[in-house]
Amino acid sequence: MKVAILGSGGVGQDLGLGFLGLGHEVKMGSRDPNKKEIKDWLAKAGTKASAGTFGEAAAFGDLAVLATLWSGTENAIKLAGPANLAGKVVIDTTNPLLFRPNAMPVLAVGGNDSAGEQVQRWLPGARVVKAFNSVNHAHMVHPSLPSGPPDMFLCGDDETARKQVAAICRDLGWGVIDMGGMAAARLLEPLALIYIQTAIRTGSWDYAFKLLKA
């Protein structure tokens, strides 16, 4: 499978390496494909990795991962070209975080809407699945925690797309909790705030969520 990674930060880099480890081809998309962090990533990523613009990556991928900061997400989608992503599964890892000086971040979108729902509206022809938004990027691929494998919560309006992303999550070492339609992103994005606030208060990002079953 060909995978487009839209975004070159820690999330995009680590998930990109994860897909490469599963044997897929990966093209990382960015506003500047020649910047140092992408060159450094390519140097360790191997022969199945490449880089290009957002549009080039979106056209390349059979599946795309949206891994941008929220402030740049809408523009990145415009640069990628919604037509390039039509019919494709798009994994939305974004959180609509609003950062404030000397205070915990808050959600810029919430209540009766979510980032996931906005992304789906911006990509009406794509099949968007919210996932990988509630854990630090260092633990997104084959998380190794003393308490065992954690669970990835995901949601999206297309059931077939959710099943495909669930299979990817399992291949990357996760249990899966399918939350149903994209409106559930209104719950999953606040879950990211719980993760972030706990990490800041404890000084550690080395944990993940798990749903314990009786």
Image (cartoon, grey):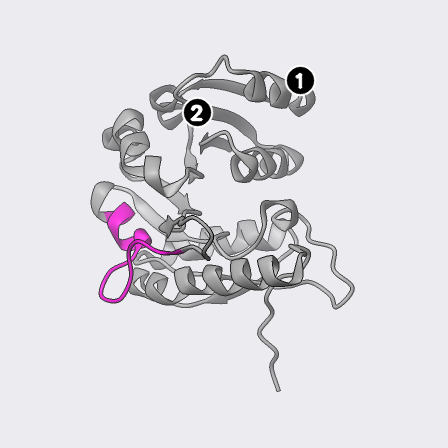
Magenta highlight on residue 33: no
Left of 210 or right of it: where is 115?
left
Q: Is residue 124 visible?
A: no
Mark 2 secondary-structure assignment: strand
The amino acid type of the residue labelled 1 equals Ala
Residue at numbered disc 2: 29
Residue 80 x/y as whole percent: 31, 27
Q: Which residue is painted at 39% across and 20% down in the image? A: 31
Q: Is residue 109 above or below residue 112?
A: above
Earlier-in-chain disc, 2 versus 1:
2
Magenta highlight on residue 112: yes
Q: Is residue 113 above or below residue 43?
A: below
Mark 1 secondary-structure assignment: helix
Left of 211 or right of it: where is 92?
left
Q: Which span of residues is magenta-colored?
A: 106-120
The amino acid type of the residue labelled 2 equals Gly
Q: Which residue is painted at 53% across and 58% down in the image? A: 196
Left of 106 or right of it: where is 149?
right
Residue at numbered disc 1: 43
Residue 119 x/y as whole percent: 28, 46
Residue at the extreme right:
146
What label sits on residue 84 in the rendered view? none
- Image quadrant assignment for residue 72: top left
Residue 135 x/y as whole percent: 56, 55
- Measure how far apart labels 2 and 1 are at the Cα level: 16 Å
